[in-house]
Amino acid sequence: MPTTTTTAPSHPPPTANPSRRLQKPHAATQLLSRTLHPTHTYLHLRLLTPLTTIPSPTAPDIDPLTIRTHLTSALRHAHGLAGTAIALDVLKVKGEEVWVRCPAEEGRSVVVGLGGWEGSEGKMKVGWRVVGWDGWAGRRGRGDGRGLFL
């Protein structure tokens, strides 16, 4: 009697290396991309008035409402309505000096907008001086930042 052998349909064995598109990025790759591309730009600003030509360490702090008003006015003047949508975080205030943070992709626009602005406070002219700016809070700023957060 003849014997018949049947074999089960063969399936390719599972691969040890699934498609690269489905793999999560390696932890070192994530660290490298976050390290090389900061998410924020940090700015050190000084509010200039005719009375504050020389920074005074004993000057009273500028109130937050005045800071926000001057920052928004400068960005609106430079970039229109889109400038008012730039997210700025006021991190520190010391006398006439202010430290702010903005998204990294908006950093240069903010520097241009604030550095070229002249406004008024009553009859007095005011403006921002960008003392320093950088993508890292602890590193020295561009210009004469002298240690951005010292």
Image: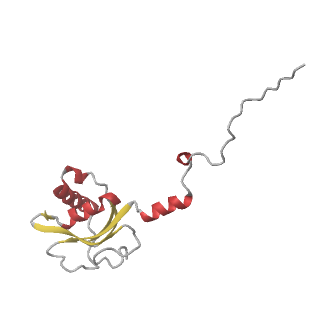
Which of the two residues, 31 or 50, is positioned nearer the viewer here?
31
Total number of numbered labels?
0
Task: Answer above or below: position of 106 versus 5.
Answer: below
Residue 131 in the figure: left or right of residue 20: left
* Outermost residue, right side: 1
* Residue 2 drawn at (x, y percent): 87, 21
Q: Looking at the figure, which quarter contains the N terminus? A: top right
Task: Answer above or below: position of 1 versus 71.
Answer: above
Which of the two residues, 22 or 37, is positioned nearer the viewer here?
22
On the question of residue 103 being in view, the answer is: no
On the question of residue 95 being in view, the answer is: yes
Which of the two residues, 11 or 7, is positioned nearer the viewer here?
7
* Outermost residue, front side: 2
Residue drawn at point x = 26 percent, y = 76 percent: 59
* Residue 56 drawn at (x, y percent): 25, 79
Task: Answer above or below: position of 58 versus 61.
Answer: below
- Image quadrant assignment for residue 138: bottom left
Residue drawn at point x = 56 percent, y = 58 percent: 27
Q: Looking at the figure, which quarter contains the C terminus? A: bottom left
